[in-house]
Image (spheres, rainbow, N blue to C red):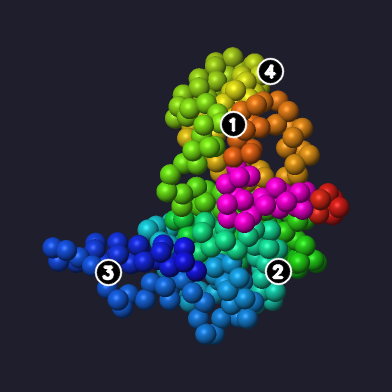
Amino acid sequence: MKHIAIQLTIIAALLAGGCSDESHPVASDNLGILDMFTPGADAAPEARQIFDDYGVWVRTRFASVQEITNGILEVDATVRRYGAENLDEGRLHEVYAYSSALLSNVSREFTRAFFPLEIFYVKTYGASYWIYPLKLLGRSRLIISWPNDPANTAPVADPANYYYQDSTLATGVWRLIATSITARLEEPVAEFVAAGKAYDNGKAYDQILNAYYSDYDVAKYDAAIEELMNTGGYLSGGGSRDFRSDFADWIRLLATESRENIQRDYLDNSAALANKYEAVVNFARRYQWDIQAAGNKFRQQYDAHK
């Protein structure tokens, strides 16, 4: 739990320093920050086991909407106003199974270093006319509405394998987890950045978009985007904006796609893409995580279900 303890100690220091009139403020010993992000004695055994293994607290209950709309360094005022609903009791086994499947594809070293501290499952999150299916609050709380499609309230037939069966949900979850990962990095991964072109805050991408809006030539737009991606080592036009967007794209892809498909769709087309791929694999390996093995498994299981 070293990484989590360090993160929360820093938060405690920030909170104490921001509220103190001392000339040299220090963190208080009694803020109980660590306890705020740890399952209590009354937590379900499944939640306790997941926390002990991966350092992620799977939460399924709140007494006040403020409990879910208050995250580390961020408050969701919109949903606080319109509310949220607790998860149905009968679906608890589904979300524990889903969380276990998700986390079992990642090393404990990696989840403890970079994952959100909490995955909070709710029935609904937001106004009746706009329910958030997924939401990242700050960089430490991932909120998942369950079932993720409000129109489909049927029980999940195979909870243990549902992670592999709903690719839309899985890629959406990984999109937000990847965003959380990049937010926790103290600095860009040098090997990854060096493998492609320098980021330009989206200048090249915006020029392509502006050209498209002037003539709506789809073929010209597609060719320009492909050239930008292949020469810069980006998986999307938006990836050219900055490191965080680019790196998050790659984490999501490798965690949910097979090496065979990545090779065919990306690596065979560009040396920059191939070099960035290796940089992401090496980064994850430093935390004992074979990220490509996770992607291979996801694709294999998804294809078998499909």
- Judged by its main secondary structure, the magenta piece is helix
- Left or right relative to 299: residue 230: left
The residue that mark 2 highlights is 97
Mark 3 and mark 4: Cα distance apart in space: 58 Å
The residue that mark 1 highlights is 234
Residue type, label 3: Ala
- Left or right relative to 146: residue 16: left
**Residue 1, horizontal then vertical, whole percent:** 50, 69
Residue type, label 1: Tyr
Residue visible at 48% across and 32% down?
A: 241
Mark whose residue sits in front, 2 or 4: 2
The residue that mark 3 highlights is 27
Residue 225 in view in this figure: no
Residue type, label 2: Ala
- Left or right relative to 181: residue 273: right
State the extent of the magenta-drawn residues as a range. Answer: 280-299
Q: Are marks 2 and 3 in contact (CB under 8 Å)?
A: no
Label 2 packing within 10 angstroms: few (<14), some (14-19), many (20+): some
**Residue 181, horizontal then vertical, whole percent:** 52, 51
291 magenta-colored: yes
Residue 126, label in figure: none
Residue visible at 66% across and 32% down?
A: 274
**Residue 234, horizontal then vertical, whole percent:** 59, 31
Residue type, label 4: Ala
Q: Are marks 2 and 4 in contact (CB under 8 Å)?
A: no
Identify the secondary structure beneath mark 1.
loop
The residue that mark 4 highlights is 219
Mark 2 and mark 3: Cα distance apart in space: 38 Å
Label 3 packing within 10 angstroms: few (<14), some (14-19), many (20+): some
